[in-house]
Image (spheres, grey):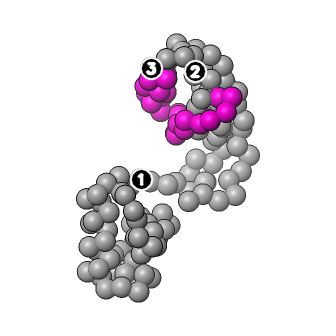
Amino acid sequence: MTISASDQALLALLREDARAPVAEIARRLGVSRTTAQSRLEKLERQGVIAGYSVRLRDDVEHGHIRAHILITVRPKQMVAVTNALRAIAQVRALHSVSGPHDLIAIGMAPTVGELDELTDRIGSIDGVERTTSSIILSTKFER
């Protein structure tokens, strides 16, 4: 599926604020409200926009510890490991990656101790061979 430059611009605005009124989006794109609404509905219908989510301010979860948890999975265990990780609320995202590790989980916990428990819990999942964690010190930007 090819996404036009105008649709890319619309998606960029939605990444900034998915709750922006269509009239505001249209004004910023330099198109009519009807055109902006039609493009938005088309992207939703085609599944380009799969949904909308909430992005919290950093101070809402102030003090929470976030980490990249690199996971090596035993052969033929990817589906089971992925399903087990999906069931853990503290795992905020899961990425399949190339290289020495198979997955990178983004984990979050209120304390270092609870983050340690999270990594232990992930490491004990049947099919997980090894984990390595890196605590996130700060986020420079996020889109």
Looking at the image, tell me whether mark 2 or mark 3 is earlier in sequence order. 2
Q: Nearer the viewer, mark 3 or mark 1?
A: 3
Q: Position of residue 53 (x, y in %)?
A: 41, 53
Q: Which residue does the numbered mark 1 point to in the structure image?
A: 53
Q: State which mark lies toward you, 2 or 1.
A: 2
* Residue 126, placed above or below residue 63: above
Q: Quadrant of the C terminus?
A: bottom right
In the displayed structure, 4 sits above or below 70; it is below
- The residue at the point 59 percent across, 36 percent down is 97
The quarter of the rendered structure image containing the N terminus is bottom left
Residue under circle 2? Answer: 73
Q: Is residue 86 left or right of residue 38?
A: right
Dot 1 alpha-carbon crowd within 10 angstroms: few under 14, some 14 to 19, many 20 or more: few
Image location (x, y in percent) of residue 12 = 48, 68
- The circle on residue 80 is 3
Q: For marks 3 and 1, give the CA distance.
A: 26 Å
Point out the stretch of residues depicted in magenta. Answer: 78-101
Q: Quadrant of residue 109?
A: top right
Structural distance between the alpha carbons of marks 2 and 1: 29 Å
Mark 2 → mark 3, Cα distance in angstroms: 10 Å
**Residue at (26% x, 80% y) in the render:** 34
Considering depth in this image, is 53 or 132 the residue closer to the camera? Answer: 132
Q: Residue at x 56, y 51 (%)?
A: 60
Residue 113 position, x and y percent, is 68, 26
Location of residue 116 (image quadrant): top right
Instruction: Decide: few, some or many residues near mark 3? Use Cα within 10 Å; few <14, some 14-19, many ≥20.
Output: some
Pick whichever, 88 or 71, lies toward us: 71
Q: Amino acid at mark 2?
A: Val
Residue 14, can we see it? no
Say whether residue 83 is magenta. yes
